[in-house]
Image (cartoon, grey):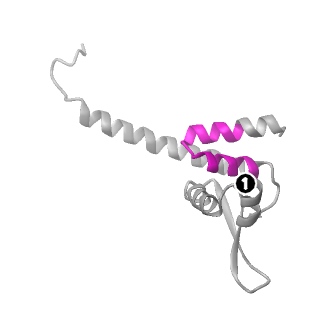
Amino acid sequence: MSGARVRRFARGLGNALGLPRTATAIVDLLVRTSGHLSIAEIVKRVKMSERSVRGNIALLVRRGLLERRPVVTAKNRLAYLYRLRPQEDVLRAVRSQFDRNLMSLRRAARRSSPRTASSGRS
């Protein structure tokens, strides 16, 4: 995928899901990366704070957009590597989010519009 297409995809995904700017930057980076990246690598490449990156990665994992792989570091510590889930999984996660949003809107519409006999239906 070309650089412009990758940026459009990441921006479109970010807009569709209402993702923060940092989360969109992380998606953009991971779309262009074939392997898994550590938090430190992501922080370095997106030029954002580690705290911001960690929070946005947690959001992306919860939304089903990223997969994380546990690894043991050279110092025998547990760490995680991240990558974007396969395209079908990303699209499934987006659809699931849209379905939840639509159900929420329907519930809100039912609560806010009283049902009356003169609702204008014939």
Q: Residues within 10 Å of mark 1 (few under 14, many from 20)?
A: few
Q: Position of residue 101 (x, y in %)?
A: 44, 41
Q: Inspect the magenta stretch and tell me whether residue 5 lies in it.
A: no
Q: Quadrant of the N terminus?
A: top right
The boundaries of the magenta stretch are 9-30
Q: Position of residue 92 (x, y in %)?
A: 60, 47
Q: How many numbered circles does the render carry?
A: 1
103 to 119, vertically: above or below? below
Q: Inspect the magenta stretch and tell me whether residue 10 lies in it.
A: yes
Instruction: Say which element carries label 1.
Output: loop
Main secondary structure type of the part rendered in magenta: helix
Q: Looking at the rendering, which quadrant does residue 40 occupy?
A: bottom right
- Horizontally, is 98 left or right of 51 in the view? left
76 to 43, vertically: above or below? below
Question: Who's the residue at 38% across and 42% down the image?
Answer: 104
User: Which residue position holds label 1?
Assistant: 47
Q: Nearer the viewer, residue 4 or 94?
A: 4
Q: Quadrant of the C terminus?
A: top left
Q: Nearer the viewer, residue 94 or 121?
A: 94
